[in-house]
Image: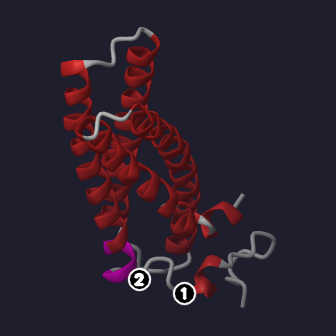
Amino acid sequence: MEFLAQIHPEAVHFPIAFLLAYVLFEILGIILKKEFLSKTAHLFLLLGVLGLIAAVLTGNQAKDIAHKLSKKGESISFKAINEHEDYANITLWFFAALLVLRTMAVIKKRFLGIIKYSFVILSLIGAFLVYETAGHGGTLVYKHGIGTDLKKMEINSSNPGTGGE
C-alpha cells in the first residue's frame, strides 16, 4: 500500500478545493437566497469530507514511509509531521461532524434562519483549519524537503537497505 503515499500530494488538493468551495457556496447561498447554491454547498461539503478521508489515508501511508526512511538514516522532522497529522485529523473530524449536522438539519427541514448563519460561521472556522493543515503540509515540503526526492519514496520492501538504488 506504499503507492498510496505517492499520491498524497495530489490527493490533498481535492479536499482543499472542495471545502473552500463549500465555504464560498454556503455564504453565497445565504446572500443570494438561492436554494441551488445551498444544495451545491452541501454537495461540496460531502465531496470535501470524502477527499479528506483519502488525504488522511494517503498521509498515514506517507508517514509510514517516513518511519522506514528514518530507520535507514534519513533525517526526518517527526515533530512537523505530527503537527500536520494532528491538524489533518482535527480538520477531518470537524468537517465530518459539520456534514452530519448539516445533513440532519436539512432532513429535518431546520436548515433555516439562525441555523444557516451558524453554518457560515462554522464553515469559516473549518476554512481556517484547512489553511493550518495545508500550511503545515507546505512546511514539510518547503522547509524540511519531505517528499521532494523521488528516490526516497522508492523503498524496495523486498530488499531492505537498498532504498531502490
Residue at figure coordinates x 78%, y 76% from the top left: 159
> Is residue 142 one of those drawn in magenta?
yes
> Badge 2, how many Cα within 10 Å: few under 14, some, many 20+?
few
* Dot label at residue 8: none
Residue at figure coordinates x 29%, y 66% from the top left: 135
Q: Magenta stretch mostly in which secondary structure?
A: helix
Residue 129, compared with residue 92, is above or below; it is: below
Q: What element carries label 2?
A: loop
Q: Which residue lies furthest to the bottom in this view?
A: 165
Q: Residue furthest right?
A: 158
Q: Residue at label 1? A: 149
Query: Residue 38 vs residue 67: left or right?
Result: left
Three-letter code for the amino acid on which mark 2 is drawn: Gly
Total label count? 2
Magenta residues span 139-143
Please say if the residues under marks 1 and 2 sit with CB atoms less than 8 Å apart.
yes
Residue 64, compared with residue 111, is above or below; it is: below
Residue at figure coordinates x 22%, y 44% from the top left: 124
Residue 6, compared with residue 164, is above or below; it is: above
